[in-house]
Image (cartoon, rainbow, N blue to C red):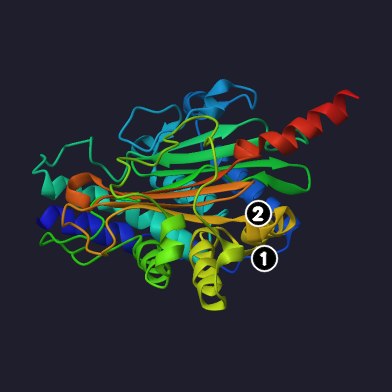
Amino acid sequence: MKRHSIILLLFLISPWAAQAQQPIKATPQAVKDEMREAARAFVATLSDDQKKEAAFAFENEERYTWFFTPHERKGLTMKKMTAPQRLAAMALLRSGLSDEGYRKATEIMDTENVLRVIEKRPENDTYRDPENYFVTIFGDHDGENPWGWRFEGHHMSVQFSSLTGRIVGTTPLFFGSNPGEVRTEVPQKGRQILRKETEQAFALLETLTPEQRKQAILAAQAYPEVVTSNKRKASLERMDGLMLSQMTVQQRTLFMNLLDTYLNNYRVTLAKQQMDKLQKSGVDSLRFAWAGDLTPQLGDGKGWYYRIHGPTILIEYDNTQTNANHVHTVVRDLTNDFGEDMLKEHYEKKKH
């Protein structure tokens, strides 16, 4: 137990957190430039052998490969980095996330320490390990061509794609938490990383009338996982659920608060960029759908699932595993995952 407490302390008070609190400019150009500088600073710390592990061509199919389970990944693992390199890696992660998003990311990494205790794993275990997260760079961040990066490990996948002048791809974004609420006697006891994602969804659900519930509730039993999993392209056959246009003023406010909980994991500029796209495609067409139990009790074995679905976005939340105390969330851009739509347009114009 003592060893895990020390790991937690070092993780939370390390220079990573201090760097994350530095003032951040909010213009689109400043965000892009800061992200480029963070990538440049990270790569500059790497040896030639490390660069071979961390760097891939932008067109490499590896860019579309992503996992949220414990899995061997391509890229450079934090475990193989020096302290300055880890600092630079965390600065890159921070360059795309808000304070709230960065908090969730670091707590997700630290929760690997909790799983070590729960599962009674040995001290040298690497299956549950807060250093078992990988950084991968795609393309030439110093040139004018498209480039991107990925920060990924158990229960987290963060990736961005950049084109001259703006960040064009911000999804998939996956955050998960096991346990959903920490109840074991560890320093992290009581932590609920995705509390807002849970509580705000139930706040909306509880306001629905019986007729609205008939539209919103798709199944009495929750789906066992986010439906789109880690597929390269997210798609569902149809859009189901209660439309925003069919909600009362109070319900619309609760719905938008829930939506903001996911978008606000990003830097404010990137969150606004996504919201502008939703407004343009018709925010009233967004739908809220539910499956599973109707009571907000983590860990009682009765899981639940919900999603926000529209023409350009799909947000999924699932809590069914580990006796329904194990949360998965994902944000997918249905037209522009991995920045594909805007990058396709760029390449077509360049060819022309």
Percent across and percent down for residue 225 are: 34, 40
Nearer to me, 59 or 80: 59
Q: Quadrant of residue 143?
A: top right
Which residue is painted at 23% across and 44% down in the image?
A: 321
Q: How many marks?
A: 2
Judge whether residue 189 can be spotted in this image. Answer: yes
- In the picture provided, is 214 more to the left or to the right than 6? right
Query: Can you name the residue that lies furthest to the bottom here?
Result: 250
Quadrant holding the N terminus: bottom left
Q: Amino acid at mark 1?
A: Lys
In the image, residue 16 above or below residue 206 = above
Query: Is there a contact, CB below 8 Å, between mark 1 and mark 2?
Result: yes
- In the picture provided, is 320 more to the left or to the right than 328? left
Label 1 CA crowd tier, 10 Å (few <14, some 14–19, many 20+): some
Percent across and percent down for residue 41 are: 58, 45
Q: Amino acid at mark 2?
A: Glu
Helix, strand or loop at label 2? It is: helix
In the image, residue 109 above or below residue 256 = above
Percent across and percent down for residue 337 are: 60, 38
N-terminal of the pair, mark 1 or mark 2, is 1
In the image, residue 332 above or below residue 198 = above
Label 2 CA crowd tier, 10 Å (few <14, some 14–19, many 20+): some
Residue pointed to by mark 2: 34
Helix, strand or loop at label 1? It is: loop
Nearer to me, 1 or 351: 351
Judge whether residue 16 can be spotted in this image. Answer: no
Quadrant holding the C terminus: top right
In the image, residue 118 above or below residue 48 = below
Q: Marks 1 and 2, Cα distance to the nearest angstrom? A: 8 Å
Residue pointed to by mark 1: 25
